[in-house]
Amino acid sequence: MVTQTVTLRLPEPLYQRIRHTAQIMRQPIEDFLLDAVTTALPLLDDLPSELVNDVAALTTLNDMALWRAARQTMSQSCQERMESLMEAKNQGTLPHEKQQELDELLHEYKRIVMIRAQAAVLLQQRGYDVSDPATLNESPVA
């Protein structure tokens, strides 16, 4: 793996926090920072190209917008339609011309799930407790 060297100017209080945390974890500062950067960045390589920008953009959102993203859901009518089409497919009665509609609904569902998951990760990194799934199902923050 090719590596690059980066020089980064840090405010003294931040540097001291990093140094202290690295000492507690018994890691060199460089290893601690590499782990922190790796954890902070979303894994975009494995995402479909149409999702990369949506997921990457989450890192720029404020906390309120992240909570909205983490609580985003598919509309009830779309959910019901997707379930109906899935049931027909499983029974072997899905008309061929309805497969594209099902594919589009599944794609949207997967997009929402990815956005919610990444938003939850970012909220957790920002210090919020998202361990209880109910917190993601509460009404959105204003």
Image (cartoon, rainbow, N blue to C red):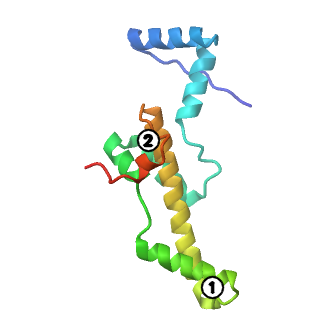
- What whole-number distance in Å separates the C-alpha atoms at marks 2 and 1? 39 Å
Residue at image position (71%, 30%) is 2
Q: Quadrant of residue 35?
A: top right
Foreground mark, 2 or 1, reads 1
Q: Residue 79, how many percent across, how many down?
A: 48, 73
Q: Secondary structure at mark 2?
A: helix
Q: Which mark is residue 59?
A: 2
The quarter of the picture where the N terminus appears is top right
Disc sitting over residue 77 in the figure: none
Looking at the rendering, which quadrant does residue 85 occupy?
bottom right
Q: Is residue 92 left or right of residue 41?
A: right
Q: Can you give x and y, in whole percent of width and height, for residue 60 in the image?
A: 39, 42
Q: Is residue 53 visible?
A: no
Q: Which residue is mark 1?
A: 88
**Closest to the observer: 46 or 98?**
98
**Whether residue 102 is situated above or below residue 11 in the rendered picture:** below
Residue farthest left in this picture: 142
Q: Is residue 23 above or below residue 80?
A: above
Percent of width and height locating residue 110: 56, 62
Residue 87 visible, this orientation:
yes
Q: Nearer the viewer, residue 115 or 29?
A: 115
Q: Residues within 10 Å of mark 2 (few under 14, many from 20)?
A: some
Instruction: Please name the amino acid that badge 1 sits on.
Output: Ala
Helix, strand, or loop for circle 1?
Answer: helix
Q: Is residue 11 left or right of residue 118?
A: left
- Side of 67 relative to 41 (left or right): left
Q: Where's residue 70, x and y in %? A: 43, 50
